[in-house]
Image (tube, grey):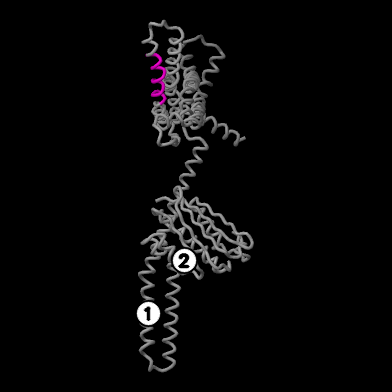
Amino acid sequence: MATLIDVISTRAGAVLSALWSARSWRATSHVLVGLPLGVATFALTCALPVGLAYSAGWSLLYAPGDDWMVTTALVMLAVVVPVPLLMTVRALTALQRLRFRVLLGVEIPPPPRHGDPRLPRLLRELGTAGTWRQVAYHVSALFTGALGAASVAAFWLVLPLELAGVWDRTVALTVLAPAALLAAPWVARGAARVDTAVARALLGPSRSEKLSVRVATLSRSRADILAATDAERRRIERDLHDGAQQRLVSLAMNLGMARANLTDTPEPARQAIEAAHDEATQALAELREFVRGLHPAVLNDRGLDAALSGITARAPLPVRLTVAVPSRCSPVIEAIAYFVVSEALTNTAKHAHATRAEVTVERIAGRLRVVVTDDGRGGATLDTARGRPADGTGLRGLAQRAASVDGTFTLHSPAGGPTTITVELPCVS
């Protein structure tokens, strides 16, 4: 019993407190302000253009022939005036958004602007679905505003008018008037909630537009991550090249000089110097290869042609290289193209049993096309590299690198060969 009483008292307190809560009065103000604003937007976006079009059509059909000036003026008004009026849709929408933001604290984001940027702004505005959804909201705002304002006003005013003796008192009215007053805040909140739902659907971005914006945002984030990763690789390459690599060069030179000059030292010491020199030389070679794998300095300094020439020159089999790239692409794209050629030739040398290979790099219609062909035994797939299990760093790694920048990776490797790897990358200068 005590619990039931507590629940009833809590609900009663909530109903009574709604009468003076700020939320109720903001909702009431929102609905009441929506009526005159809806009338204005309906007149500008619907009534005036339709009236002008009707007048122009009537004058063309029924006006006397000597009134050609009037007919021409009306036709011009019907054709020219509605277009600028449609352009005011965004201003009216901004006014409606201001109403939602100030009175309800609801932020309705604008739909994204699409369309061909080469077209005039007028045609772009008229060609977007968001503009016509906004027109639909402004047309419907008159009816939803009138219905909502009438309902809210009736529930708020029925008791004051009854107490003022505007109409004769009856038992039913005496009972219903206080109930209507208690229900008025909830009617206002409901009307505001319905208006908010309609506004979100028509004034805000649609689901497909939200997805488009999300995709664009993710694409920019991915591009930023790729650029930051490439920049970090280049920084590490510079630090290793200028730091550890130079120290290893100095160490190998000193050990080499000691090895050449200290010939009269005891045999154990001489063997230790020789072993240290060999280890330093091997470590320097491995570090150079590692640095080159991170990001070759020649790629930044001299471009893709010079960097690929270095790869083909170091390849253990003859490679014919053709590079036709009149202007440089972005550093990220050049780095991916470089590693595609490097990994493809490494894979060819290890597994293809090929006698020669050919690399062609060209820029076609804003895309960088890289083709690596060998005359080996073929049989390569993304999951296996010529019969060997893939380790994630071979052909599948190349496909993933290409996909990371919206590129394409194609592998054609029938049994018996030849094998052709084709990668196309968006070349952004």
Q: Residue at coordinates 55% horizontally, 66% vertically from top-left?
A: 348
Where residue 313 sits in the image (x, y, percent)? 45, 68
Q: Secondary structure at mark 1?
A: helix
Residue with the mark numbered 2: 312
From the image, give the main secondary structure of the stretch colored magenta.
helix
User: Quadrant location of the N terminus?
Assistant: top right
Q: Where 59 sits versus 24, above or below?
A: above
Residue ID for mark 1: 251
* Magenta-drawn segment: 73-86
Foreground residue, 270 or 190?
270
Describe residue 66's horizontal placement relative to residue 406 as left or right.
left
Residue 392, horizontal then vertical, whole percent: 56, 62
Answer left or right for 352 relative to 143.
right
Q: Label 1 sits on what residue type?
A: Leu
Q: Is residue 311 above or below residue 251?
A: above
Question: Which residue does the image show at 36% across and 82% down from the upper left?
Answer: 254
For marks 2 and 1, give the CA distance: 30 Å
The question of residue 357 being in magenta is answered with: no
